Image (cartoon, rainbow, N blue to C red):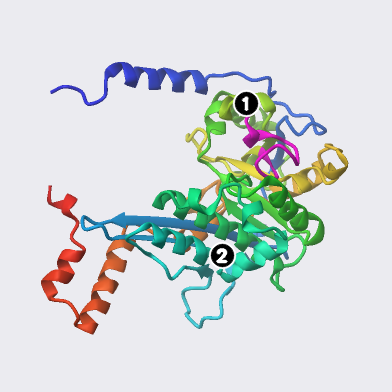
């Protein structure tokens, strides 16, 4: 049987991965306490102390999904929400009395798509959602100024529209969380992904970053494991891991007396050469300034726990608010606040020691589970629409069933 994919194509992929994962950069294994681009090593917070803090930890996430049927009927849905943990317990964020659902979420009404007008209706509804209206009022810009692409360009396809709506709602919820009366200085907001956007002009995102850091004094960090930066740093991470485990750990003056709890963590700012090779030279995505870029973050690689024999698994890429990392950047002072950065990463280890997802902040896992539209969403929506149609008895049973027939499943 002939191979579907030519072997030459497979070999080129393997060669590319081998080259990327074996690149060496001038990042030492022994850090300099004054240089954020070198490894900053510290002892993990003892497990029994992880909840001993007054800070609350919010996590924001979003999701979207769609499905098309053979008869021209499509359903498309996006949603976003957040959860909050304090002293190790989840707090209620909504006004519901449901004992299980404690997070706050927002879901639109328009989900039917049969023509281009329905796409425009979904876009228009987004701008009427309460969190989005408040966010746009804060930004003090018209949609045509805030969003680089116009309404018609965004509505060219279902996937583009839903992705846009999900992202805008996520940013709006970050603003909502920061403005909640129960949010206090030194609280954390964790965002799934990075602090950059193709859908919001940079100057407006910068305004949000400045507001969060200097006015609200809350810490915003984007967390991701799915990034080309990790592949680019594979060799460096392996070298640092080897140094921490084989050389430094045996002689490190741990405060923790239990050998099982003696873990070393590490973070460092991702240098420009790594960013350029990850995203391309001249990419606006990696620019470390308040203008000419895509957001207000600084990329850091961080090991916030240690998982034996799983190379790179316990490393994440954190996108830290540039106003937290360099508080005087508006005055063109790029000096890093090393004390503030140490505090951020030290506190993140309060969230990364849960057994089911070592090295990754558990509030983001809970936000993901709370908000994600899984594959079953299609069946749920279809069944509920069918039930509604049956209850009105305006169509024949066979016609209703055929309306949602997925003809591809018959092949």
Q: Work out whether mark 1 precedes mark 2 in sequence or the reverse, and give the earlier one.
A: 2
How many numbered circles are shown? 2
Residue 55, by quadrant, is bottom right
Residue 88, by quadrant, is bottom right
Q: Residue at x 47, y 80 (%)?
A: 98
Frontmost of labels 1 and 2 is 2
Residue 16 visible here: yes
- Asked whether 298 falls inside the magenta stretch, the response is yes
The majority secondary structure of the magenta stretch comes to: loop
- Asked whether 53 falls inside the magenta stretch, the response is no
Q: Secondary structure at mark 1?
A: helix
Q: Which mark is residue 276?
A: 1
Indicate the position of residue 369 as horizontal and vertical percent values: 45, 60
> For this rendering, which residue is in front, 243 or 38?
38
The quarter in which the N terminus is drawn is top left
From what the image shows, is residue 244 above or below residue 354? Answer: above
From what the image shows, is residue 298 above or below residue 125? Answer: above
Q: Which mark is residue 212?
A: none
From what the image shows, is residue 278 above or below residue 329? Answer: above
Indicate the position of residue 402 as horizontal and vertical percent values: 15, 64
> For this rendering, which residue is in front, 133 or 55?
133
Q: Which mark is residue 127?
A: 2
Q: Residue at x 76, y 34 (%)?
A: 36
Count neighbours of disc 1 (C-alpha within 10 A) and say few if under 14, some if 14 to 19, many if 20 or more: some
Q: Give, as a single range, the part of the protein colored magenta.
A: 282-299
Residue 362 visible here: no
């Amino acid at each position: 049987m002939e191979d579907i994919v030519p072997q030459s194509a497979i070999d080129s992929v393997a060669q590319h991965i081998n080259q990327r994962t074996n690149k060496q950069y001038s990042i030492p294994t022994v850090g300099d306490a004054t240089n954020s681009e070198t490894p900053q090593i510290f002892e993990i917070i003892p497990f029994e102390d992880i909840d001993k803090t007054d800070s609350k930890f919010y996590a924001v996430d979003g999701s979207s999904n769609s499905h098309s049927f053979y008869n021209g009927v499509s359903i498309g849905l996006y949603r976003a929400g957040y959860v909050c943990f304090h002293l190790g317990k989840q707090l209620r964020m909504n006004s519901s009395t449901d004992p299980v659902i404690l997070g706050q979420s927002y879901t639109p009404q328009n989900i039917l798509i049969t023509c281009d007008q329905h796409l425009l209706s979904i876009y228009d509804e987004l701008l009427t959602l309460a969190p989005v209206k408040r966010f746009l009022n804060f930004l003090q810009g018209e949609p045509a100024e805030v969003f680089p692409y116009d309404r018609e360009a965004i509505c060219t396809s279902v996937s583009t529209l839903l992705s846009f709506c999900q992202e805008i709602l996520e940013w709006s919820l970050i603003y909502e969380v920061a403005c909640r009366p129960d949010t206090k200085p030194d609280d954390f907001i964790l965002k799934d992904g990075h602090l950059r956007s193709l859908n919001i002009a940079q100057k407006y995102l910068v305004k949000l970053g400045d507001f969060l850091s200097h006015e609200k004094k809350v810490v915003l960090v984007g967390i991701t494991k799915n990034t080309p930066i990790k592949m680019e740093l594979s060799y460096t991470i392996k070298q640092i891991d080897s140094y921490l485990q084989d050389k430094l750990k045996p002689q490190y003056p741990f405060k923790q007396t239990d050998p099982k709890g003696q873990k070393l963590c590490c973070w460092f700012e991702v240098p420009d050469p790594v960013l350029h090779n990850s995203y391309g030279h001249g990419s606006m995505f990696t620019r470390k300034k308040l203008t000419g870029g895509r957001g207000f973050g600084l990329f850091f690689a961080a090991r916030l726990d240690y998982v034996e024999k799983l190379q790179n698994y316990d490393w994440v890429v954190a996108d830290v608010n540039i106003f937290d990392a360099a508080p005087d950047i508006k005055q063109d002072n790029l000096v890093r606040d090393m004390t503030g950065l140490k505090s951020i990463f030290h506190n993140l280890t309060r969230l990364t020691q849960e057994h089911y997802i070592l090295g990754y902040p558990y509030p983001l896992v809970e936000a993901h589970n709370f908000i994600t539209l899984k594959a079953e969403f299609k069946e749920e929506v279809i069944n509920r629409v069918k039930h509604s149609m049956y209850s009105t008895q305006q169509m024949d049973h066979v016609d209703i069933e055929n309306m949602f027939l997925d003809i591809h499943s018959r092949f």
